[in-house]
Amino acid sequence: MRLTLELLQQAPQSLNPAKQRQLSLRGFKVPTIENLGGTNDAYECIDLSDNDLIKVDNFPPLKRLHVLMLMNNRISRIALDAFDPLPSLCSVILTGNKLEKLVDLEPLLKLKTLERLSLLDNPVTKVKHYRPYMISKCSTTLRILDFNRIKDKERKAAALLFAGDRGKKLLEEIAPPRIVGKELAEKTAAEAKTGPTPEVIERIKRAIAEAETIEEVTRLEKALKSGILPDELRPEQGPAPVKKDEGAQPKAAGAVPPGPVKDDAMKVDG
């Protein structure tokens, strides 16, 4: 479902426990962030959890927005300028997404007003020195990381860990900068992949409707999500046509191929 102006108008609005006006856009399976300018910058908190977001970007100027909730999406990228139109943003909840590398978190490091950040249940939290890296790189306004308060001794330890030449070398090891050429190649390769055709989608949906067991329905639903047609639904391939030599002459009907010349035929009657 697209994030349309109609959906924005119909979405639940409330006053959250922090006395903030909140717009709930949770669970609509929204694939991209769009049309948030239609909120007229009327909310301090926007909840976009439980959707199908892959990338965080495309925010309009929202000066009033303080809290952004993005839990349980499929987010693997954050645009470098994603938060630039949100000057008052102080809390970002990205729990349960697919952010993998420390370099993917660069846009968060630029947030000068950030106070609370959660990246729990993202692969990036398993990267070596993840927590001290975030403590040392984020704004000093950051007070709570992954729902744990940052202590003064953690700040001192993080600063010491990344100090001097040794610290610089460690940073290059755990958070290598992006390689533009490599990323462009990966983007091109991703764009080259085509999604399932309408014919494939229709064929899988038909098979789901005719399925007789829960296991079969589950398997077909996974196939529908991935867009890969199961083997039993693939059209049978006929034998490949035999290519004819361009220079070959067609044989006359009933023509008999020449055989070896018999000795009897060579004899002349005396």
Image (cartoon, grey):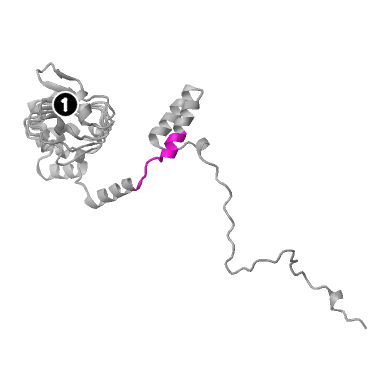
Residue carrying label 1: 46
> Where residue 240 appears, x then y in whole percent?
57, 52
Amino acid carrying mark 1 in the image: Ile
Q: Is residue 40 visible?
A: yes
Left or right: where 245 falls relative to 264: left
Q: Which residue is the extreme one toward the top?
A: 17
Write the residue at 47% across / 35% down: 203
> Where residue 263 appears, x then y in whole percent?
84, 75
Write the residue at 46% across / 26% down: 217
Q: Which residue is the extreme one toward the front?
A: 6
Q: Quadrant of the N terminus?
A: top left
Closer to us: 146 or 81: 81
Count the numbered circles shown: 1
**Picture layout, residue 43 above or below residue 127:** above
**Picture layout, residue 108 above or below residue 23:** below
Specify whether residue 194 is painted magenta. Answer: yes
Q: In the rendered image, which quarter is residue 44 located in?
A: top left
Q: In the rendered image, which quarter is residue 85 located in?
A: top left
Chain part drawn in magenta: 192-203
**Picture layout, residue 108 above or below residue 47:** below
Write the residue at 78% across / 71% down: 260
> Where residue 259 appears, x then y in whole percent?
77, 69
